[in-house]
Amino acid sequence: MKIVSDTATAEADSDFASSLLAGLSAPTKSIPCRFFYDAAGSALFEKITQLPEYYPTRTETEILRARASQIARDAAPGNVLIEFGSGSSLKTELLLEKMHQLYAYVPVDISAAALSAAQARIKSRFPQLKVLPVCGDFSRSLALPATIEGRPRLGFFPGSTIGNLPEAAAVKLLANMAKILGHGARLIIGADLKKDVRRLISAYDDEAGVTAAFNLNLLKRANRELDADFDVSQFDHLATYDASNGRIDLYLVSQAEQTVHVLGRRFDFAAGERIHTEHSHKYDITGFHALAARAGWRPIETWTDAERLFSVHVLEVA
Ligand code: SAH
Ligand code: AVI
């Protein structure tokens, strides 16, 4: 089933073009992390989720597996389950197995490739379920399907994707989700926890180099889509931990002085110069509750694993 219109694809291309040109023109170069997720990037992210070093996916999955029946009680018959940054929708299956009378499942993702693969799998596993995918940027205004208008909603935002936004943007997004889901609605949200720095760094700089390939894919994507001439072999992947802000930062580091062209514009790099590509914030429970409260959410339940690596929260619109 076609889920992206040509207009949406053209908008996505121009968003990448204008964001990349702006990000490379700034005194400190950066590329927003939402551009990781073209088809190749989404496939690389799925490989990351299987890595021994990348504990978040398997840990959150185990928490959700243990709590799925409890979570399903928040989905009354006729509810709509709206998932933000749904990706493969693999974790969602754990909830859908227990939610029997949903009106519809609405996965929202910027990656058309991830959405259509997930939609096909969910439709074949749950043939009775209405699946209404929305391809778009959840931090902008989203056109949700008209058929869910007025229906009670339950939100799902797993993966600690909230951590990829700077704090002010995270509060804005959570507040917008409260508006979309409606008064009294609940949101099930995953948040990665602070921990030993070596453990964090190895999760973002794995032995097999999959996270490096995921990061470098941004440059390959620019070459594919924006007539850029990045020599990808001249950039290194770097993951650092910023303890004062409680976050992993990913960078692409220029190995040498070099010049790159994007859409006919010239960009000079010094040896060692960095392009910032991702923040991945890590929380403690009280810090996460405080963030949610600033966006109008009240914590109802919080679950973690035995090692306290990851947290899953049930929030309610206050
Ligand atoms: N929820 C899945 C996937 C997490 S990866 C899991 O828990 O494993 C993050 C997902 O969010 C990707 O599928 C990516 O395409 C999507 N995403 C990232 N930024 C986005 C944005 N601004 N708007 C919509 N989707 C976004
Ligand atoms: C999607 N997001 C929560 C991942 C993370 O852990 O911040 C993206 C990622 N980046 C590198 N590895 C995984």
Image (cartoon, grey):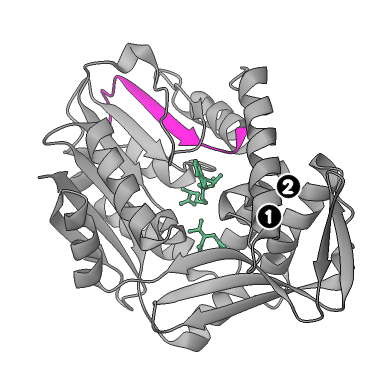
**Callout 1 environment at 10 Å: few (<14), some (14 to 19), or many (20+)?**
many
Which residue is located at x 25 percent, y 23 percent? Answer: 101
Q: Mark 1 belongs to which amino acid?
A: Leu
| Residue 243, percent from left and from top | 42, 84
| Residue 22, percent from left and from top | 65, 51
Q: Is residue 265 above or below residue 291?
A: above
- Residue that label 1 marks: 44
Which residue is located at x 44 percent, y 36 percent? Answer: 140
Q: Mark 2 belongs to which amino acid?
A: Ala
- Residue that label 2 marks: 40
Taking the magenta stretch, the answer to whether it contains residue 268 is: no
**Which range is magenta?**
99-113
Q: Quadrant of residue 50?
A: bottom right
Residue 178 or residue 29, whichever sits in front: 29
Answer with left or right where residue 74 lies relative to residue 219: left
Give the structural element (helix, strand or loop) at label 1: helix
Q: Is residue 18 above or below residue 46?
A: above
Asked if residue 189 shows in the view, the reply is yes
Asked if residue 53 shows in the view, the reply is no
Which residue is located at x 19 percent, y 63 percent? Answer: 289
Asked if the residue under mark 1 is in contact with the one under mark 2, i.e. CB atoms within 8 Å, the reply is yes
